[in-house]
Image: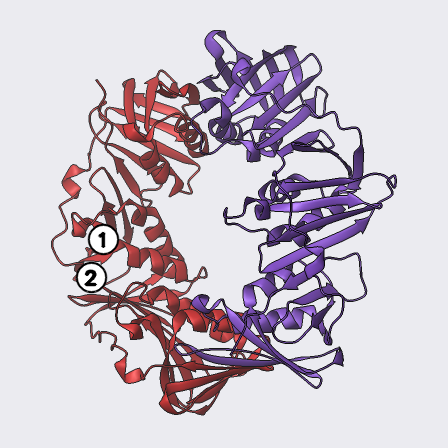
Chain colours: A red, B purple
Amino acid sequence: MQFTIRQNTLLNTIQTVSKAVAVRTTKQVLTGILLQATEKELTATAYDLDLGIQDTVPANEETGLRIAQPGQIVLPARLLTDLVRKLPSSEIQVTVHTNYVTEIRAGSAQFHIHGIDAAEFPTLPVLHAPETLQISAPLLKDIIHTTGFAISTVEARPILTGVHVECKNQALTFTATDGLRLATRTVRLEIPEEFAWNVVIPGKSLNELAKILPDDEQVVVVQFTDTHCLFQSGSTLFYTRLIEGTYPDTKRIIPKTYQTEVAVVLDDMLGAIDRASLIARERENHMVRMEVHDDVINVSSSSPELGHVLESVGVVEKTGEDLFIAFNARYVMDALRASSAAEVLFRFNGANQPFTIVTRGDESAALQLISPVLVR
Amino acid sequence: MQFTIRQNTLLNTIQTVSKAVAVRTTKQVLTGILLQATEKELTATAYDLDLGIQDTVPANEETGLRIAQPGQIVLPARLLTDLVRKLPSSEIQVTVHTNYVTEIRAGSAQFHIHGIDAAEFPTLPVLHAPETLQISAPLLKDIIHTTGFAISTVEARPILTGVHVECKNQALTFTATDGLRLATRTVRLEIPEEFAWNVVIPGKSLNELAKILPDDEQVVVVQFTDTHCLFQSGSTLFYTRLIEGTYPDTKRIIPKTYQTEVAVVLDDMLGAIDRASLIARERENHMVRMEVHDDVINVSSSSPELGHVLESVGVVEKTGEDLFIAFNARYVMDALRASSAAEVLFRFNGANQPFTIVTRGDESAALQLISPVLVR
């Protein structure tokens, strides 16, 4: 294998796939990046057996890629990334010699690094899904951003470390919960009516996907099989295994009615809870109290060691009863930070029932459900 | 005590002193910041018994400070900093009530936090040095930057965790060494000829001082006693204890002559060593080799696991013999990164003797001395 390529082209493609490089593994080949050159393009692949990312660069003027001899090699990911980042010239030449020794040359610097036989690298899953779904990259990114944070990070119930992705009746729904809070979002899609999927995608994979999705209006093509799913965005393929098992039925826990509804300016409420949380103690679940009284919300917190804090937040609109409730400040801040809305609605059913936060006037935005802290 | 103050004024002064707040201590009062208000000014002090920083804010329009009632209180540093940073309004009112309960009010937010009696706060050392020295803030900052990194970070020889500061014959010299490398810098000052000091200042203290020194041409006034020194810059006082003991005589280990001298472009050499260090292994002291041959320097490194790297760097000027030497790449990179010169001189006395790096054409810049790695 021999090719020359522009430094930033190679760096971009290596960095794109590097999220799927295995970190803790006894199989050395998984800590590498597979480079494959055909007559027309260079493909970089990383695959830790859960997550696989593949990126392809075409040979042309813009990428600076010129392939002198097709071939393939696995190179240690971390060394390759550091090396390409630090090379002194904009053009890099890569040549594989005998025994997988790979020469990387740029300017007056010449590296010879030990590669690994590409035949040892695991094969990415082959997906032949009968149906594919298309969704805009920024929308998919936003759906992940507004739901993915609510997954469980403990392995006690592995299914909750995933995001439930359901597609039916021309709607796509993402749901994540850790048992104490839940985030869910449904968007309408122009797809055939009979189209139906029901899978659980590892939350970590989705959060990595969101990082490499482009910000412009590109289309992402999504395919599922029983064990894997594949997101294709431009020249990048993103594979992830699915989590086996049945996701709990979360629809029944989302309240349909409410006794109290208050509309507030998001930034005002987020600021007040953030300040109150300074006094809230970790061992008491970062507990902050909220009192809805007439057209004011009093946000407060106290701790025997630190002191107490009280702040009033104006209500934009209110319907229903007054209320006194306590919650984990971090859950409410996560939910509010996931939103880019100006105003949100808090909907309560008394102090002991979960409450919801939704964007005012946008039903396609996420719904956030949070269990209160029960106080005597 | 009661005063109002602009948010960013209070935040700046708290952040300035916060480096001297004790982190690991059983004395709770040392984790706080002492606030003292007189009729005319507010003073913030932090003091962990090694390092003390005091900053004073005058009452005027610019600072927004208005003192309604003089007094003093100690407030928990971390909570105070987070709280002031997150307050919603530009004007903050601080009021001390009975039992040291302190009310902090801004906009609609009202904190009551538990303060500590100011009488418990330790007193800063009183310095009545007979002589003071004046030096420009950017020059002092640069002297610390070019020498302070070379201190020892292990406590085996406490004296080497300090920087040796010597003043005699109208020259000020800073020297730091960890036993394997040394950095020293001498600057001429317009001071009385009989003026003489010889102290060892904790390296950590100097590095903190460099962070809070201003970038503009302000004058820093320096005072020493047998146990402490004080740097005064504008409204900020910076106290540090000195390290007891006698600093080793480092002058005799700095070679006066050399067998080989090469002038190189600093960025070229730094880049080549940085790249070679990617292959250099930690357990062999990040060893990189340098071969001076005719008018080229070959920088190389190798490792059985990773491979090898070779890069040639052009020589701007050379005198003396050819040479082959090995060194710890991190020491040479630290030395080169401390310099802002375009070209530096490497001066060698064979492969087994320490070599020096100096700025080409600037004797007032730092001298860096590095022990080679001895190779068979």
Helix, strand or loop at label 1? It is strand
Expressed as whole percent of the image width and height from the top left, the position of residue A231 reads 30, 66
Q: Position of residue A161 (x, y in %)?
A: 22, 51
Q: Nearer the viewer, residue B254 or B134?
A: B254
- Work out whether residue B305 can be spotted: yes
Is the N terminus of chain B in the top left, top right, bottom left or bottom right quadrant? top right
Q: Which quarter of the figure has residue B95?
A: top right
Residue extending farthest top: B98
Q: Is residue B44 above or below residue B199?
A: above
Relative depth, front residue between B25 and A266: B25
Q: Which mark is residue A363?
A: none
- Can you tell which mark lies on residue A162? 1
Residue at the image point whose x is 48% and y is 75% from the top: A10
**A83 horizontally vs A282: left or right:** right
Q: Which residue is mark 2?
A: A242
Toward the left, the furthest residue is A246
The amino acid at mark 1 is Gly
